[in-house]
């Protein structure tokens, strides 16, 4: 499964958002069924693309107390411009080239 989460962030607070994003990576790395993540940027928005073993692991993650608290903290920052949108897609095929880790896993603050 692929989950694409989209957000609009106050551009003046992007550095703050990236710190929050790093905390999200740490949270993802601990989740059963999590495969991979990409943090991507558009002109005025951000997206997080995650790959999961199956729908049950996505559902478990989104319902987990840790993720709910993570989202609550993000909402409380005031840096979001509008609501998050999330889309789930089933993977039907493709190829991911094995490569070295691009992003160092942060230690939690």
Image (cartoon, helix red, strand yellow):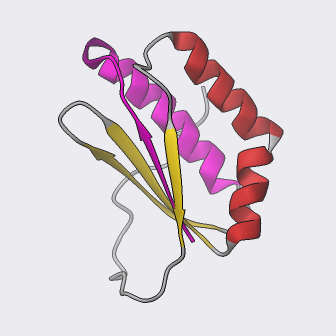
- Image quarter hosting the N terminus: bottom right
Q: Check the picture and name the quadrant holding the C terminus.
A: top right
Residue 37 within the segment the image draws in magenta:
no
Q: In the picture, residue 60 is in which quadrant?
A: bottom right
Image quadrant in which you'd find residue 107: top right
Figure check: 9 above or below 107 = above
Q: In the rendered view, does 34 fall on the left or right side of 21? A: right
Q: Is residue 93 above or below residue 71?
A: below
Q: Residue at x 73, y 34 (%)?
A: 68
Residue 83, given in percent of the width and then of the height, sits at 50, 28
Task: Identify the residue at image location x=56%, y=40%.
Answer: 24
Residue 101 horizontal side relative to residue 89, left or right: left
Q: Nearer the viewer, residue 9 or 39?
A: 9
Outermost residue toward the left? 43
Where is residue 14? Give x, y as percent: 31, 22
Main secondary structure type of the part rendered in magenta: helix
Q: Which residues are magenta?
A: 1-30
Q: Is residue 72 above or below residue 86?
A: above
Q: Residue at x 35, y 70 (%)?
A: 100
Q: Give coordinates of residue 54: x percent, y percent.
A: 68, 74
109 shown above or below 86: above
* The magenta stretch spans residue 21: yes
């Amino acid at each position: 499964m692929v989950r694409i989460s989209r957000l609009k962030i106050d551009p003046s607070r992007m550095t703050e958002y990236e710190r929050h994003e790093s905390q999200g990576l740490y949270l993802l790395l601990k989740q059963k069924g999590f495969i991979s993540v990409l943090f991507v940027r558009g002109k005025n928005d951000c997206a997080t693309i995650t790959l999961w073993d199956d729908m049950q692991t996505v559902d478990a993650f989104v319902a987990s107390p840790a993720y709910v608290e993570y989202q609550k903290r993000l909402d409380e920052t005031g840096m979001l411009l509008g609501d998050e949108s999330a889309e789930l897609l089933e993977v039907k095929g493709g190829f991911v080239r094995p490569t070295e880790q691009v992003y160092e896993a942060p230690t939690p603050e």
